[in-house]
Every structure is written in C-alpha cells, then in structure tokens.
Image (spheres, rainbow, N blue to C red):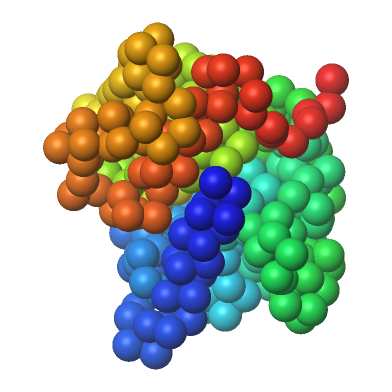
Amino acid sequence: MRKTLQAGLLVIVLSSIVLAATTPDFKLENLGNGVWAAIGTDEGKAGANAGFVVGDDGVLVIDTFEDPGAAKELLDEIRKITPLPIRFVVNTHYHLDHVNGNDVFAAAGASILAQRNVRDWMRTENLKWWGNTIPPAMKARVESLKLPDVVYRDGVDIYLGPRKIEVRSHPGHTGGDSIVYIRDAGVLFCGDLFWNKHIPNLTDATTGTWVKTLDTMLGYGAAKFVPGHGELGTAQEVEAFQSYLEDLRGDIGQAQRSGKTGDALVAAVLPELQSKYGSWGFFKEFAKPDIQQTAEELSGTKRVPAAQQ
C-alpha cells in the first residue's frame, strides 16, 4: 500500500516538472479588500494553492508552493501589486507542496510561522514520499528546507497595522494543520483541510477528527474558502468535501463489518466512490490509497507522525 501511495504522489510531482513549460503554474484571483488567492494548476510547478494579504504596513503570505521557481513567480506578482515588505509567511502544514518556497520569502525578509509540529516534521516526514528511492539532490533539499521561525500550539493573531489576521490550528489532514481567517474580507484559507473537487491525500490524516474540524471551519462564517487544491470554494463545496470523508468512512465501516479486508475491501468500496467522486481531480492517484489508509485508521493500525503533547 505504501508503494502505491508513493507512486501516486510521484506521478503528481513528476507531471508538474514535465508539463511546466506549457502550463501556467498558478492564477491570481483578487478576493477583494487586499486579499489574493494563488490557485495552482494541477500540472504546473506550484503543486498547490497559496495566497497573500496586503495590510497597511506589510504583506502576509499563506504557503509557498512545491517549487521555489513558482514561489519566485508569486513574489514577483506581489511586487507588482504592492511595494510593502513581505513580513510573514504562514505554513498551513508541513507537506512539501506547501513549504518548498519558504526560503524565497525568507530571503525577502519574511518570518515563517507554523503550528509547532510543522517544524518538527518538515525535514523528516517529507522524505517519506520517495521511500528508499529519493534522489540525493532531493534528499538534500528536504533536509535543508527553511523551517518556521515562530511556532504556536493553538494559534496566533498577526497584525498588519490595524488589520488582524487570525491563524488557528485545527487537526485532520495532519497533526499540524492551520487555517488563516481574514475576518474583514470574509476569506478563510484552509490549507489542505479543504480540497475542492479533488480527492485528498490521507497519508497523515485522522478522518474522524477531520470531519469535525470541517464543521468548525464552516462555523467561522466565511464567504470564500481557499482550498489547498482546487478552485476557490463556497460553504456548500466544503460540505461536499466533508461528505466525501463521511462516505469513505461509512462505506469502509460497512465493508469491514461484513468481514472484508485488503483487496476485497477496496473492490467493495471503490465503485461507490467512483460513482460519486470519479470526476474529481486526483481520483486515480488517491482513491485506492484513501480506502486502504482509512481502513487502517478505522481498525486502529494506521501510523501517523507523532505530535507534540
């Protein structure tokens, strides 16, 4: 199962390299009131979504993409919009596709912030995507990633002049996820706690907790939800993603109660997921691993990174 997941992840990473020359890495969307989303294309170098907030005395960036080249493109776009200093970066979690451009923004003067487990896992857990076949140059890159300068347990408020940015930690996708809420703009950056019409990577997930976290996120009352992958979303699309996790858990639980395990369990659950979610991005890469990993979670055998107590 681990090899299957690694293969799916490598397909996504390698496709971004092969197609980068002809595919835009991301598109900027003006969400109003000085808030911008950078929506990464599935095939480009960005690898995920990011964004930034412009305040009176500086800029806060949310996530830094999978590739430093895409991060430099984002920095260039910010410079076209404002000359204000890049003061902060918030990493929503430790996964490589959200942090590999940290050094680009640190060199521009930003302090990097994240939930405290992100600092512990960034240079270690990110090695697992390649298993025992990681190229030496990539291993060196991961082991030299720019770590957060400031960490928190539950959250932190950041001010850009009088403008308040609310950063809060909510578990689910990993044990170190954060959301970024810009209340005065009605925008919530979700990181990978929300995948809009995309099948999620559940390698580090606890889906039971994640379903509850999505209720909490909906309770913020945001009008616009920026996912970690996929287009800008609404509350209804967050609920649709929540339904995916609930359906996954429900279908697997039913199969387990009937005595199914392993390939038989996957064969029982996959067609139902295909009928509902087969058109979503990354279905081919992640649907089977999602079934296998959630089955492990429900049976109490899944391994996830150890979080600080």
Q: Is residue 292 left or right of residue 160?
A: left
Depth check: 269 or 22 in front? 269
Give the quarter of the image for residue 257: top left
Asked if residue 13 is positioned above or below residue 268 in the image, the reply reads below
- At 29% from the left and 29% from the top, the residue drawn is 268
241 horizontally vs 87: left or right = left
Residue at 71 percent across and 23 percent down: it is 154
Which residue is farthest bottom?
21
Residue 168: % across, % down: 61, 28
Instruction: Give the number of callouts.
Output: 0
- If the image is split into quadrants, where does the C terminus sit? top right
User: Looking at the image, can residue 213 be seen?
Assistant: no
Q: Is residue 47 left or right of residue 143?
A: left
Q: Identify which residue is drawn at 78% across, 46% down.
A: 121
- Say if 235 sits above or below 257 in the image: below
Residue 28's x, y, as percent? 35, 65
Residue 2 in the image: state x and y as whole percent. 59, 49
Q: Is residue 267 visible?
A: yes
Q: Residue furthest top?
A: 257
Q: Is residue 152 above or below residue 66?
A: above
From the viewer's side, name the closer residue of 72 and 47: 47
Q: Nearer the viewer, residue 297 or 223?
A: 297
Residue sitting at the far left: 275
Q: Position of residue 193 (x, y in %)?
A: 48, 35
Q: Is residue 129 left or right of residue 247?
A: right
Q: Kindly identify the residue that appears in the image at 30 percent across and 30 percent down.
A: 269
